[in-house]
Image: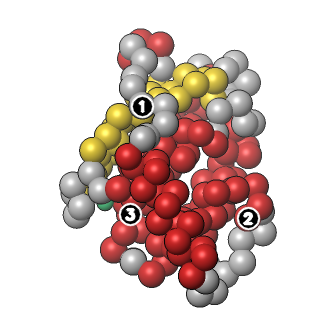
Amino acid sequence: MPLSEDLRELYQKVILDHSRSPRNQGQFSTDSCVHIHSDNPSCGDEIDLYIRFNEDGSISDIKFEGQGCAISQASASMMTEKVKGIPRQEVLQMIQDLQHTVLGNGEVPNSETLGELQLLKGIQKFPQRIKCALLGWRGLERALSSAKLTLQA
Ligand code: ZN
């Protein structure tokens, strides 16, 4: 589905806003959180996620530090605003839905739960930026699976 002019403008505004003033920036001491480093060598993006989990596996708090292009940092910033306190299964679903959105794989069934993240479908026009947009999310996916191991242990 092509983006309307309005949506494109909004997309640029939101990406700029988050890349200029990233939310939840910083870190926790690594003994109190799961720390995941991700990088995207083709663009030079790096994201370090620091995530604290509740006993039920949901995320109690999340911070990130990073450098790289506006899209990688804005997408990670938007992610940290979105996933706190959400049940683990819903976060995993959100990661799937976001991937479909960014890759342009047809209609996303739960797109309304993505809220402003839906704007990231603007990336479809810039395929070389898809890795940037997903960098933080792939890190989150890894963090969720490592937290599962910890919880089961
Ligand atoms: Zn990038």
> Residue 131, labelled with which disc?
3
Is ligand 1 less than 8 Å from the beta carbon at label 2? no
Residue 52: where, in percent of width, then height? Answer: 55, 22
Q: Hey, what amino acid is under mark 1?
A: Gln
The circle on residue 25 is 1
Q: CA distance from mark 2 to mark 3?
A: 20 Å
Distance of mark 2 from mark 1, alpha carbons?
26 Å
Numbered label attached to residue 111: 2
Mark 2 touches mark 1? (CB < 8 Å) = no
Q: Nearer the viewer, residue 134 or 65?
A: 65
| Residue 42 seen in the figure | yes
Is 26 located above or below residue 2 in the figure? above
Q: For ligand 1, which image quadrant applies?
A: bottom left
Give the crowd class for mark 2: few <14, some 14-19, many >=20 residues within 10 Å: some
Q: Is residue 64 left or right of residue 99?
A: left
Marks 2 and 3: which is nearer the front? Answer: 2
Q: Quadrant of residue 2?
A: bottom right
How far apart marks 1 and 3 lie (CA) works out to 21 Å
Q: Residue at x 49, y 36 (%)?
A: 23
**From this viewpoint, is residue 102 visible?**
no
Picture disc at residue 84 = none
